[in-house]
Amino acid sequence: APIHGVPGLSSPIFPTLCHRAVSGASRMVINRPGGHAIGILALMSSFSTSSADSGAEPARLLLHLDEGIHRVSFPRGAVDGVAVREMYELAAELMEERNLKLLFDFTGVNMLSSGVMGMLVTIRKKLMHVGGQLHIAVPHPQALEAFHVMNLHLLLTLFSDVQEARAKFKP
């Protein structure tokens, strides 16, 4: 059955995420399969009825689903405390899916707080218990250096670009 009038979308997690769209997202865009994301959910801390063209502030997180990989991106180029909480909430909802492949894409983010890094460690630990995989793309050298300073490169699976992170997921 189509979800919110979107034919062809059948992932079991999307009803939950679509429910959140009613109370916590500004917009939802679904593209057809064919190399592009089939689902994008823009999460915001407060409900906004304004459209993307009206000058509304971009969402904190975007969830992209493509070829079985859930990629979370940060269109604002920054990850604040609210976004850290939303990272956890989104990951917790997605963990209900078997063999979850989760990719946090920090493209455009040049600084990450210790809160972000701590949340990534927490998400990794929970994902390991359910048999999921977590990859983290950190293209900005300064942000990547922060992981090395805290020795988190030894614990987390880090990549310098999204394509490499996607390619390294186990089947």
Image (spheres, helix red, strand yellow):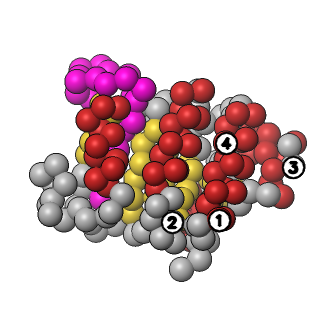
Q: Quadrant of residue 162?
A: bottom right
Does the magenta-highlighted stretch encompass residue 129?
A: no
> What separation in Å lies between label 4 and label 1 (alpha carbons)?
16 Å
Mark 3 Cα-neighbour bin, 10 Å: few <14, some 14–19, many ≥20: few
- Label 4: state its secondary structure: helix
Which percent across, then down, holds residue 86?
Answer: 51, 37
Q: Is residue 135 above or below residue 152?
A: below
Nearest to N terminus: mark 2 or mark 3: 2
* Numbered tag placed on residue 151 in the rendering: 3
- Name the residue located 54 percent from the left edge and 80 percent from the top edge: 171
Q: Is residue 23 left or right of residue 153?
A: left
Q: Quadrant of residue 80?
A: top right
Q: Amino acid at mark 1?
A: His
Quadrant (top left/top right/bottom left/bottom right) for the N terminus? bottom left
Nearest to N terminus: mark 4 or mark 2: 2
Q: Which residue is mark 4?
A: 119
Q: Amino acid at mark 3?
A: Asn
* Residue sitting farthest toward the bottom: 171
Q: Is residue 27 left or right of residue 119?
A: left
> What separation in Å lies between label 3 and label 4 (alpha carbons)?
15 Å
Q: Amino acid at mark 2?
A: Leu
Q: Which residue is mark 2?
A: 100
Mark closer to the observer (2, 1): 1
* Numbered tag placed on residue 129 in the rendering: 1
Which percent across, then down, holds residue 20?
Answer: 33, 40
What stretch of residues is rendered in magenta?
38-58
Which percent across, then down, holds residue 5?
Answer: 12, 51
- Label 3: state its secondary structure: loop
Mark closer to the observer (3, 1): 1
Nearest to N terminus: mark 4 or mark 1: 4
Q: Is residue 148 left or right of residue 36?
A: right
Q: Are marks 4 and 1 in contact (CB under 8 Å)?
A: no
